[in-house]
């Protein structure tokens, strides 16, 4: 399958080097007009440079169209100005790749609050700023492709990166919500969790691995996720030419069958925490559409304060759940109670 971006307009943040540069160059090579955004700072977010302009020159030398933007993703007004400049020049915005990021790695015990705040601000709030700046345009044109950049640190954790991990998993959650809100407007939102040899990882990878994990080996997955035929609501890991899907999921679950134990005179009354842990079903806070006794049109059941799920069967409705588990407990108790000698055969 050949993926093309003729007449598409793309914004790539953090595109002055590494993954962002690889994305921008490949988008332009396939016909897209590209806004190359990069503040040009060091990997901890300090300083400035003309890195974005150098990428624009590469694109133009290859016959493509691009312009640079040095705005900070943490400043919403600067992102709005960038979007307006792109629309004034090319008339639309079709693709946004939120790639800008920084690192300030320390164990949580040694991390200053400012280091935590800044990393979350760049990765999470910065991506929200850029997405908000293009959102209305994409809704109006009934087309948009947005890619968030998460990380295995966000999905699975990594020592010394509490700030980075918090921001990256937040991006996965943001993408999942925007996927729902943008669906009827033709906006598809996905998340990529790349592993690449860049200036942010150059002191982590051995030399041989650094070359194998070149950013160019991640770009194909990113471009697929912003293509016209892209899926939506996906989390894709990519690195060294390998791609895999990650999922947020639940086990089938187990219904608690023991009744609420009575308070023990020896130990005194149970705490509210103990009651909550031992109560298998909480009273419903609103009715469920699948229950014949309910008149609400709501499609959800709130089975307790922590779990909101769609009911698929009548017995899962909290309106009847209490009677269901009590009946099951009585049956279990009757099976376990030994018969009297006179009743045996």
Image: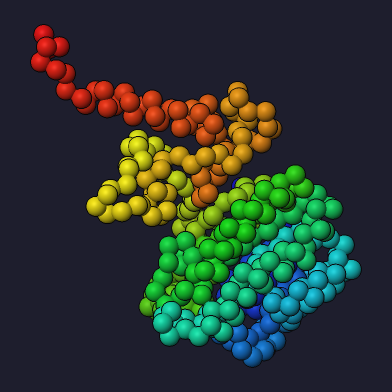
Picture quarter containing residue 300?
top right
Q: Residue furthest front?
A: 265
Which sits in the foreground, 130 or 283? 283
Q: Could one spot residue 228 in this view of the protein? A: no
Q: Is residue 314 above or below residue 119?
A: above
x then y, percent, for residue 93: 79, 61
Q: Is residue 301 left or right of residue 33?
A: left
Q: Position of residue 42 (x, y in %)?
A: 59, 87
Name the residue furthest right. 88
User: In the figure, is residue 307 to the left or right of 77?
Assistant: left
Q: Which quarter shows the C terminus?
A: top left
State the residue at coordinates (70%, 55%). Answer: 145
Which residue appears at 72% of the width and 60% of the height? Answer: 95
Considering every residue shown, the one lying at the far bottom of the view is: 47
Residue 141 shown left or right of residue 255 in the figure: right
User: Residue at the location (65% across, 71% down)?
Assistant: 125
The percent coordinates of residue 285 (x first, y second) are: 59, 42
Residue 224 location, quadrant:
bottom right
Q: Nearer the viewer, residue 113 or 150?
A: 113
Residue 37 makes an appearance in the image: yes
Residue, far top:
345
- When the figure is inspected, residue 59 is found, relative to residue 333, above or below; the finding is below
Q: Is residue 277 left or right of residue 43?
A: left
Q: Quick one: 84 or 205, which is closer to the camera? A: 84
314 above or below 104?
Answer: above
Count of marks overlaid on the render: 0
Would you identify the image quadrant in which residue 80 lies? bottom right
Residue 62 at x, y percent in the picture: 72, 72
- Looking at the image, which residue is at 83% across and 74% down? 81
């Amino acid at each position: 399958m050949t993926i093309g971006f003729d007449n598409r307009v793309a914004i790539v943040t953090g595109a002055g080097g590494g993954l962002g540069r690889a994305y921008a160059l490949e988008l332009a090579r396939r016909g897209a007009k590209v806004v190359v955004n990069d503040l040009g700072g060091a990997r901890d977010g300090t300083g400035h440079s003309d890195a974005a302009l150098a990428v624009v020159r590469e694109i133009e030398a290859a016959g493509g169209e691009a312009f640079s933007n040095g705005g900070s993703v943490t400043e919403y007004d600067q992102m709005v100005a960038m979007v307006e400049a792109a629309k004034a020049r090319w008339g639309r915005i079709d693709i946004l790749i939120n790639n800008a990021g920084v690192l300030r790695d320390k164990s949580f015990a040694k991390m200053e609050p400012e280091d935590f705040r800044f990393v979350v601000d760049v990765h999470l709030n910065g991506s929200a700023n850029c997405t908000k700046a293009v959102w209305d345009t994409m809704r109006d044109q009934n087309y948009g492709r947005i890619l968030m950049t998460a990380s295995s640190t966000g999905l699975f954790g990594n020592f010394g990166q509490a700030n980075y991990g918090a921001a990256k998993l937040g991006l996965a959650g943001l993408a999942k919500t925007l996927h729902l809100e943008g669906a009827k407007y033709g906006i598809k939102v996905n998340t990529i969790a790349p592993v690449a040899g860049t200036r942010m990882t150059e002191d982590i990878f051995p030399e041989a691995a650094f070359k194998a994990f070149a950013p160019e080996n991640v770009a194909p997955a990113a471009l697929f996720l912003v293509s016209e035929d892209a899926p939506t609501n996906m989390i894709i890991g990519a690195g060294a030419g390998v791609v895999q899907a990650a999922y947020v999921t639940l086990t089938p679950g187990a219904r608690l069958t023991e009744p609420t134990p009575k308070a023990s005179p020896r130990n005194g009354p149970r705490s509210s925490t103990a009651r909550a842990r031992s109560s298998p079903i909480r009273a419903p806070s609103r009715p469920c559409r699948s229950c014949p006794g309910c008149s609400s049109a709501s499609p959800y059941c709130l089975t307790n304060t922590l779990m909101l799920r769609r009911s698929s069967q009548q017995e899962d409705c909290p309106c009847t759940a209490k009677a269901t588990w009590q009946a099951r407990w009585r049956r279990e108790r009757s099976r376990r109670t030994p018969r009297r000698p006179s009743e045996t055969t």
